[in-house]
Amino acid sequence: MAGNKKNSAELTETVRVTFVDEDAAPQGAALILTDSDRVEGYDRLYPGAGLDAVAQATGFKNKSGRKFSTFVANGQDAVQVFVRARGDDETFDYEMAVAETAKAMKGSGVRELTIHLGGSDATADDAARAALGARLASYAFNRHKSKATLPKTRPLETVRVAVDDPAAARNAYDNYYGPVGDGMVFARDLVNEPPNVLYPETYKDRLVALEELGLEIEVLGEAEMDELGMQALLGVGKGSERESFLVVLKHLHGRDGDAPALLVGKGLTFDSGGISLKPGANMWDMKGDMGGSAAVVGTMMALAKRKAKANVIGVVGLVENMPDGRAQNPGDIVTSMSGQTIEVQNTDAEGRLVLCDALHYSIDKYKPAACVDLATLTGAIVIGLGHEYAGLFSNDDGLAEQLNLAGDASTDKVWRMPLGKPYDKLLNSPNADMKNIGGRAAGSITAAQFLQRFVPKGTVWAHLDVAGTAMKPSGRHDARESTFGTGFGVRLLNRWIASNHEGAER
């Protein structure tokens, strides 16, 4: 099976996207996004279908959310045509509208979808995002299913976007939305992989394979990290038979001398909780405890593919947390690379131990213009924000606002949470410089306060707790997210970098 290729960075999804003139002959099922009460203009593309008559018979109006579908003859085939009103809303979400239609088509066996945007005021970006919506909704992670359990109907293979200016739409897609989609799919694949397939070594191998895209890759094994004094990170992996790694991905295509944007991700390929063992119910979800690192490496893939003119460095700590006889114990005191000592009161508060050494190493070495770390860090953030927003913590109002704007523009939304000395005091330990938990109250805040202790003064920094957004729960309704891994963070970080580190906003 494809998932067993240890060095593979191949994407599971292979939807082909094309952009055509509105007069091109339609193929497969169709989606018409209209800003009119009438659809008579499309009767010429589907002669004899009487689409406008059907629209009038159903009482169709140009109000957001109004829609109908019908079957029409296209040659010798009967195909389904979906008609959806765009309404007068200037913020109409083309991506979501297409995603909902593509999701409704799942299981139908239809392998081609034509999206009609011509004649409306859809921009090139709207057309590109429409194609991305179809791709994301069509994603399926089937690489570990045998032929006997594979879906009987083949998934969507081709998306054709019919638009007034196909060249401009193609340019927007190829230069931004397509690569971002690739990065999201790569991140989803990583989060969806089982922990016996994706563990630190095989994860590292997939990242090394990204060198073919032009990324520079550096790998630190346990010997190198031990020499650097990363005992906080190494302590987390002591109970695992698998070696831990720190992987650095560099995309340096900005101006010479410009300080890079730094992205740091938590990569716990499986988190049992260690000696502080998690409850057995739903522990399998902890294969996704590397969702922060997946966002970082998916972003780096997208930057490389779209040839972003920016200096960006991604750093991920890849560790497995297991409870064998060598595992660290509650009460152990470890010395981080920064020299600060940590009393490990709970071995299930392990992500911050990985991140603190990764942050210190990368900030000290690369002197970033700004640093953003991402981690599925706390269950507390899920209690506070649910599954709609990632928690945002920052020591800089300007960076926080940049990320908030990037979240709104990209649909990877964030909500700023507080930091402050009263929370920081909860981490004080009588036995070491700090402890790794602050108690039951304000758990996501004290986790962020812990990380801030490893960020030097003067470093512009933000922490994103993505525990509620990197993995999709059964109750989350987003047509673009059809599997466990969501790819959250890839589009947010790309938007942030495009708007603030490339000098040109998309």
Image: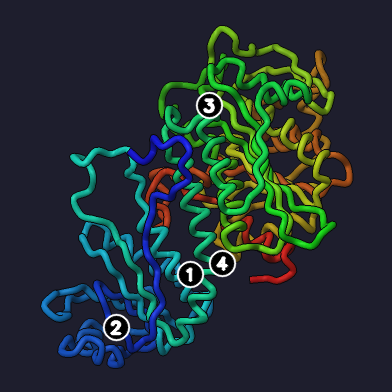
Residue 175: quadrant of the picture: bottom right
Q: Position of residue 69 (x, y in %)?
A: 24, 74
**Can you tell which of label 4 and label 2 is closer to the viewer?**
4
Asked if residue 133 is positioned above or below residue 123 in the image, the reply reads above
Residue closest to the eye, 269 or 61: 269
Give how far apart the Cα atoms at labels 3 and 4 are.
34 Å
Q: Please report whichever mark, 4 or 1, sits nearer to the chain's N-terminal start.
A: 1
Q: Which residue is mark 1?
A: 129
Q: Residue at x 79, y 19 (%)?
A: 429
Residue at the limit of the structure toward the top, as seen here? 325
Q: Which residue is mark 2?
A: 60
Give how far apart the Cα atoms at labels 1 and 2 are.
25 Å
Q: Residue at x 61, y 47 (%)?
A: 296
Q: Amino acid at mark 3?
A: Asp
Q: Which residue is mark 4?
A: 176
Q: Please report whichever mark, 3 or 1, sits nearer to the chain's N-terminal start.
A: 1
**Can you tell which of label 4 and label 1 is closer to the viewer?**
4
Q: Please report whichever mark, 4 or 2, sits nearer to the chain's N-terminal start.
A: 2
